[in-house]
Image (cartoon, helix red, strand yellow):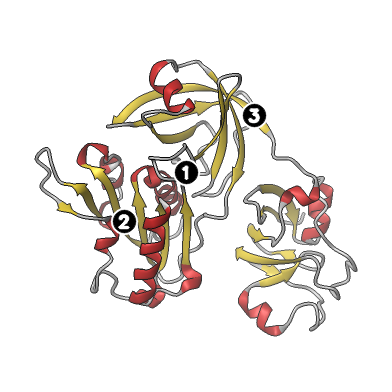
Amino acid sequence: MSNKYNITCVFEDGATTHFHTSAIETVYSAALRSGLTLETDCREGACGVCKAFLADGQCDIGDVSDEALTEDEQEEGFLLACQARARSDMVLEFAYPLSMLKKEVAVIDARISELEPVADNVMRLVLESDADTPVFLAGQYVNMTVPGRVPARSYSFANAPGDNEKMEFFVRLLPEGAMSDWLRDHAKVGDSLQVQGSYGQFFLRPPRAGRVVMVAGGTGLAPMLSMLAQLKASGNPMPQVTLLYGANFAGELFGQERIAEYGDNVTLHRVVVNGEDGWQGQTGFVTDLLADGLLDDAASTDAYLCGPPPMIDAAREKLLALGVPSARIFAEKFLPATSVEGAA
């Protein structure tokens, strides 16, 4: 019997689909069998229409022409879905939206199983469902809706992808906002929501050299918690992770006890903008922590950034200056807390 592998496809619009394949069928054939018709033309490895980037995993690229897939592209990690056959679980990135294929991401009904404040204006929300919970990659998000009350809002998973029993999120409660008002004033255990996903091109890649730096602002810590849990559960030696975490006030920080469970594998640096209320740590912006000497091998470091756009832009600039390759800096921006609710 042929080995069975899981294929995850991430599209330009952030939508994600999943299907199974065997070692003897092509990615395109397996997708078609699952009901997903990927973009293609010749189906003979000659046109390049079905080109995808292999973000994770191994495959046999099959018989392809130099015009459709050059040697440089092969070395960079590209393949043709009509020819490639999996040799492990794979994550593929496609340069067009899933919506172009006229396929919608499923919506599932869920209910609140846990609801608790974990910091000033931060609520921990755990959902469960009688249906299958969304398959996701560590770092991705869902769109969450309260039918008739709250339109879709985007929140990143905080739990590991392998945890099929729950969906965990950390939500920043804004002074005004449909989801914030509902969670703060009305929501209770047992209440129903709808979840659609998963989405996002911000997800964990295999560490190249055992060095990872994460920069999180506010509830941008949530996807980092998911990534840490996945790194621990992967079965491979956990890399050395430097986690830089910032907030406006000390009371807004959360997650320290969970991070401490990783021991020496994770070095946590916390900083707040306003060092009041007895705060004994460093003050300033989280990007101030990206200083010379922080990374002992920047060229072999993978970086993950999640927070408001100004933080992302400043962190990217400093990481590049430190020597982290641009292609190994992955980021998720969400709207500032002073604006409307967005991905977090």
Foreground residue among 84 and 120: 120
Label number found at residue 269: none
Asked if residue 341 lies left or right of residue 37, the reply is: left
- Tag 1 secondary structure: loop
Mark 3 = which residue? Answer: 108
- Look at the image and tell me whether residue 267 can be seen: no
Residue at the (23%, 73%) spot, across then down: 293
Quadrant the N terminus occupies? bottom right
Asked if residue 159 lies left or right of residue 56, the reply is: left
- Indicate the position of residue 100 as horizontal and vertical percent values: 78, 51
Residue at the (22%, 48%) spot, across then down: 272
Mark 1 = which residue? Answer: 160
Mark 2 = which residue? Answer: 243
N-terminal of the pair, mark 2 or mark 3, is 3
N-terminal of the pair, mark 2 or mark 1, is 1
State which quadrant residue 187 falls in: top left
Task: Decide: is 244 above or below 72.
Answer: above
- Look at the image and tell me whether residue 33 can be seen: yes
- The amino acid on which the numbered mark 1 sits, given as a three-letter code, is Ala
Q: Tell me the CA gap for discs 1 and 3.
A: 19 Å
- Indicate the position of residue 191 as horizontal and vertical percent values: 51, 16
Task: Decide: is 293 above or below 55.
Answer: below
- The amino acid on which the numbered mark 2 sits, given as a three-letter code, is Leu
- Indicate the position of residue 311 as horizontal and vertical percent values: 37, 56
Q: Residues within 10 Å of mark 1 (few under 14, many from 20)?
A: many
State which quadrant residue 297 falls in: bottom left
- Tag 3 secondary structure: strand
Camera-nearest label, 1 or 3? 3
- Indicate the position of residue 119 as horizontal and vertical percent values: 28, 33
Q: Tell me the CA gap for discs 2 and 1.
A: 17 Å
- The amino acid on which the numbered mark 3 sits, given as a three-letter code, is Ile
